[in-house]
Amino acid sequence: MKVRRILVLSFLGLTLVFSMVRVSTPGNFGEILRQPKGENWQDYKVYWNGGPTVSQAVAILFDPKADDLTLAVDKFWSKVDDGKSLSGLVGWMKDEGKYPHVMRVVGPNKQLFGYVYTFNESMSLNVVNEKEMFVDAIVH
């Protein structure tokens, strides 16, 4: 029983330390948040990332065309130009059994930069300036 108590207290202590590190980490970073369904993909610049073929996709990024904010992507993101390709990517990701979902990509002041459909909740997002955020390739 004493060993269990020590393990529980150690776990709680580590959780507190990691929480404090997350809260106190300085920097100019964005984050992703869950988003409800219901948008038209043609209102966005759409990119996918994950591997050399669509069967290795781990994320689909949606950058709204109508706003003045930009999601800049690196060379490992590929542009999606048609609904058939987008449908294929979404279908493949759903068939992987990893439960992808739509997340909001927001800046440090909670301004909405776009959306990402992914089962990977860890992305490198760096704010370039108040109007642009850089989205790095996703390592999986």
Image (spheres, rainbow, N blue to C red):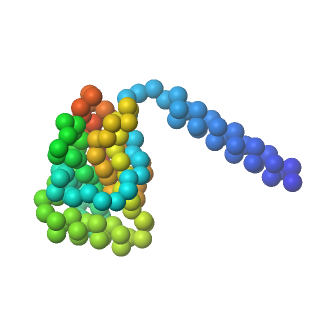
Between residues 8 and 42, which one lies in front from this camera angle?
42
Residue reaching furthest to the front: 38
* 136 over 35 or under it: above or below: above
Q: Is residue 7 visible?
A: yes
Residue reaching furthest to the bottom: 95
Name the residue at 22% across, 58% down.
40
Question: In which quarter of the view is residue 28 placed?
Answer: top left
Name the residue at 79% across, 46% down.
6
Q: Position of residue 10 (x, y in %)?
A: 72, 43
Name the residue at 40% across, 55% down.
120
Q: Is residue 89 left or right of residue 8?
A: left
Name the residue at 31% across, 41% down.
112
* 74 over 20 or under it: above or below: below
Between residues 137 and 82, which one lies in front from this camera angle?
82
Q: Quadrant of the N terminus?
A: bottom right
Between residues 117 and 140, which one lies in front from this camera angle?
117
Q: Is residue 50 visible?
A: no
Residue reaching furthest to the right: 1
Q: Position of residue 89 (x, y in %)?
A: 25, 66
Q: Quadrant of the C terminus?
A: bottom left
Q: Is residue 24 left or right of residue 1?
A: left
Q: Position of residue 122 (x, y in %)?
A: 42, 48
